[in-house]
Amino acid sequence: MGEQFHLERATMADAPAIQDLVSGFASLGEMLPRPLAEIYEQLRDFLVVRDNNRLVACAALHIMWEDLAEIRSLAVLDEWQARGVGAQLVEACLDEARALGIITVFALTRQPSFFERLGFHQAEVMALPRKVWGECFRCPKFPNCDEVAVIIEFKA
């Protein structure tokens, strides 16, 4: 898979940089923005990659229920894309999900082929009622979401 990068848990000091990275892609319509308060509240979900002290990528594994988690806020700076950083972040999230005993991991994305290369398959978003009725209904794009649901399932 590409180069090896050092992934680590996000720290409190990373929250503004995570928000900046996610906001850059959100401004292009590639993902939903995340308020800084939400990033702080969910900071334990985030993994980051740094180049020296500069945050260059992030992703979060957000637990939805005992058997369901979402990979969200996957963002990689343009100059770091196509180097395997995103794939390694997703694999780290999947490793954590397996270690926790979570059997279904999903993402909502505008890049389904990226996730499909990592073993995910496309699914109807309505197959994820905890996501739809827990969060999606508050989204300004609901019910006309332009993201594709992708899922990977592990054996229990």
Image: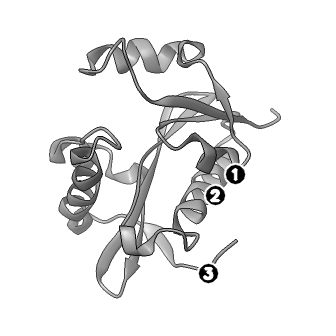
- Pinpoint residue 30: horizontal percent, then vertical percent: 35, 44
Residue at figure coordinates x 74%, y 45% from the top left? 119
Residue 98 lies, with reference to residue 70, above or below; the image says: below
Q: CA distance from mark 3 to mark 2?
A: 14 Å
> Which quarter of the figure is the C terminus placed in?
top right
Residue at figure coordinates x 37%, y 15% from the top left? 144
Q: Nearer the viewer, residue 66 or 130?
A: 130
Asked if marks 1 and 2 touch (Cβ < 8 Å), the reply is yes
Identity, as a three-letter code, of the amino acid under mark 2? Glu
Reading the image, the residue beneath label 1 is 118
Which picture quadrant has residue 67? top right
Reading the image, the residue beneath label 2 is 91
- Pinpoint residue 51: horizontal percent, then vertical percent: 38, 83
Reading the image, the residue beneath label 3 is 3
Q: CA distance from mark 1 to mark 2?
A: 8 Å
Q: CA distance from mark 3 to mark 1?
A: 16 Å
Identity, as a three-letter code, of the amino acid under mark 1? Leu
Residue 135 lies, with reference to residue 7, above or below; the image says: above
> Which quarter of the figure is the N terminus placed in?
bottom right
- Pinpoint residue 26: horizontal percent, then vertical percent: 26, 45
Q: Nearer the viewer, residue 3 or 79?
A: 79
Nearer to us of marks 1 and 2 is: 1
Residue at figure coordinates x 60%, y 61% from the top left? 87
